[in-house]
């Protein structure tokens, strides 16, 4: 197979989000990702081909460790076993997923809603007893947000229904009510580091722990992102433009991680 | 002398009463006990309280067939096909009571049940779950500086339905792939009913005894149901049938189409063999190719 070192076809949304996440991973870190996680899986396998060859990741659904393929399949698919270096019985995994503080350096999660303090919700939109949208539920999200050293939130839409002043149901604790409220709730240090969306990259102001604009994708204005966010974002000066995926990163992603171009098809 | 536990599909589910709490094993699109679920629907069971581990079509089909009054939701999803259609519709209509729980809550609750304890301790992770489901999460006292803890109340299903790849007629059940939560669910449940794709000899079981995740003493009944997890996967034997899952989701959107699906795939075929004939050999052939080389 010929490896092209540079790929200049512009990135699809899913590819951009995967590259932005991959860049933030450090070599040797331990990672957990959940189900239905094409972008997260691509990000981990891409990071292993770039600056983080010893990244250790486990698939929460099946307990597969470091499955590596040249294409993306559901993390809940047993076919992952074939290319994994281990698979762990879930009752044993639970001990470090659900109880142990800081076993994982980070988790990457998507959500129905995220709020100004980075709490996330995958349970319901509206009232739990008669919701407007019934989501899939909490599973390990509570423990991953609560106990990992940090977490990332990846959203493939950016609008006021996704970016809320307060989520309708906290199933993944972020910075709770801001300030030191997370620590006061008895949780270990941690919480959300970055939120990546179709409009930009966001982090949290260190004192108030309110969501802050870190960079805006090319062509996106502050007015546009504020108009699509359900609360006031912290803005410090003029935010930089996001460094979009480079041709060498896209070449690796498309030839070693996602040869079937799943990200382009699902998240154009 | 071991006791033979091999029974027919119908006999396996005939004593599950209306109003039973029912554990469902597997994991999302893997090893859901679908042949047993269809047999239970044919029997006309009502008012079930479901306790599914992270699941997809097993709880959704029971909900869509009108057999369920409440369900625990740790995670119920159709993954790449979206949200679970009947679970979502009945929850949003307010006609299905949903008790949300997280991984620590269900794992702690099953461990409590396994050990005959009222609860086990789990960390308080700051979620809205204890406020929403105080019957499942109880605050525990803590000294200053100690980690805040909750009691995860015991989760003890009346019956659980599981699917695995093979067993002998005495109920020694073997998993060729991950057993997911099945062993915990089996130990926590009062009665354990398992379907397997094939019954094998006890010699075969003994040759690979490291695969026996459910020894016979933990199993009440075992059923031979080839392709019994269809349309979900049975690890190493067949993949999830994505085309069928897509048809299911499509049929779920429309009352007449859903009634037709239930009639064709659930109510009319009285046996697992008749169910497989509704699919056809060509369809099954598309999902029997596995890339896995585990066994």
Image: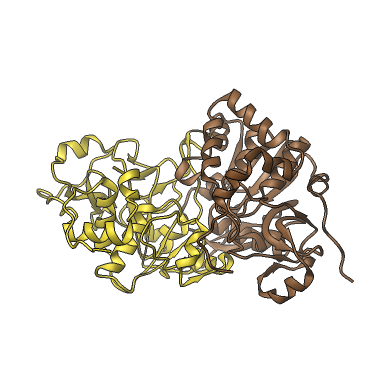
Chain colours: A yellow, B brown
Q: Is residue A77 left or right of residue B151?
A: left
- Is residue B127 or residue A16 the one in the foreground? A16
Q: Residue furthest right?
A: B1
State whether residue A236 is above or below residue B280: below
Determine the image quadrant of residue B116: bottom right
How many marks are shown on the rendered structure? 0
Residue A251 lies, in percent from the top left, at 22, 59
* Residue A42, percent from left and from top: 34, 58
Residue at (61% x, 37% y) in the render: B97
In the displayed structure, would residue A157 be above or below residue B294?
A: above
Residue B68 location, x and y as percent?
67, 37
Residue A175 seen in the current view: no
Residue positioned 31% across, 59% down in the render: A43
Would residue A194 appear left or right of B80 to someone viewing this image?
left
Q: Please state if A142 lies on the left or on the right of B66 as rendered.
A: left
Location of residue B149 in the rendering, given as x and y in whole percent from the top left corner:
53, 62
Query: Is B259 placed left or right of A218 in the picture?
Result: right
């Amino acid at each position: 197979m010929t490896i092209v070192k540079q790929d200049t076809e512009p990135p699809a949304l899913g590819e951009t989000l995967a590259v932005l996440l991959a860049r933030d991973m450090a070599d040797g870190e331990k990672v957990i990702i959940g189900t239905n996680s094409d972008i997260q899986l691509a990000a981990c396998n891409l990071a292993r081909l770039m600056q983080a060859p010893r990244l250790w990741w486990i698939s929460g659904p099946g307990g597969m460790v470091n499955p590596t393929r040249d294409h993306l399949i559901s993390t809940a698919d047993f076919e992952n076993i074939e290319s994994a270096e281990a698979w762990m019985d879930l009752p044993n995994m639970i001990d470090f997923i659900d109880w142990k503080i800081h076993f994982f350096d980070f988790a990457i999660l998507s959500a129905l809603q995220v709020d100004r303090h980075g709490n996330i919700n995958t349970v319901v939109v509206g009232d739990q007893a008669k919701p407007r949208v019934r989501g899939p539920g909490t599973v390990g999200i509570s423990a991953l947000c609560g106990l990992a050293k940090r977490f990332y939130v990846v959203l493939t839409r950016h609008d006021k229904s996704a970016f809320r002043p307060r989520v309708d149901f906290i199933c993944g604790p972020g910075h709770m009510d801001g300030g030191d409220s997370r620590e006061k709730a008895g949780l270990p240090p941690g919480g959300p580091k970055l939120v990546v969306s179709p409009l930009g990259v966001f982090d949290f102001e260190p004192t108030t722990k309110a969501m802050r604009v870190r960079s805006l994708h090319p062509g996106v204005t502050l007015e546009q992102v504020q108009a699509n966010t359900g609360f006031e974002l912290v803005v410090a000066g003029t935010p930089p433009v996001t460094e979009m995926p480079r041709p060498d990163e896209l070449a690796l992603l498309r030839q070693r991680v996602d040869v079937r171009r799943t990200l382009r098809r699902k998240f154009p | 002398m071991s006791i033979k536990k091999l029974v027919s599909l119908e006999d396996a589910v005939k004593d599950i009463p209306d109003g039973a709490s029912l554990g469902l094993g597997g994991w999302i699109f893997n090893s859901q006990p679908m042949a047993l679920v269809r047999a239970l629907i044919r029997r006309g069971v009502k008012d079930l309280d479901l306790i599914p581990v992270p699941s997809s079509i097993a709880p959704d089909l029971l909900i869509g067939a009108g057999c369920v009054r409440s369900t625990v939701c740790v995670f119920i999803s159709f993954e790449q096909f979206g949200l679970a259609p009947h679970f979502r519709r009945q929850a949003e209509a307010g006609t299905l009571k949903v008790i949300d729980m997280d991984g620590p809550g269900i794992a702690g609750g099953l461990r409590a049940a396994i050990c005959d304890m009222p609860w086990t301790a789990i960390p308080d992770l700051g979620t809205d779950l204890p406020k929403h489901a105080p019957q499942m999460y109880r605050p525990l006292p803590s000294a200053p500086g100690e980690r805040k803890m909750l009691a995860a109340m015991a989760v003890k299903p009346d019956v659980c339905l599981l699917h695995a790849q093979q067993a002998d007629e005495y109920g020694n059940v073997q998993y060729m792939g991950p057993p997911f939560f099945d062993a915990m669910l089996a130990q926590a449940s009062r009665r354990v009913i398992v379907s397997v794709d094939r019954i094998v000899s006890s010699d075969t079981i003994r040759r690979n005894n490291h695969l026996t995740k459910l020894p016979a003493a933990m199993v009440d009944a075992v059923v031979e149901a080839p392709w019994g997890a269809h349309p979900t996967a049975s690890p190493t034997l067949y993949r999830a049938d994505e085309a069928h899952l897509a048809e299911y989701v499509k049929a779920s959107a429309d009352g007449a189409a859903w009634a037709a699906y239930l009639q064709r795939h659930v109510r009319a075929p009285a046996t697992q063999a008749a169910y497989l004939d509704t699919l056809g050999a060509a369809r099954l052939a598309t999902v029997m190719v596995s890339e896995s080389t585990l066994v």
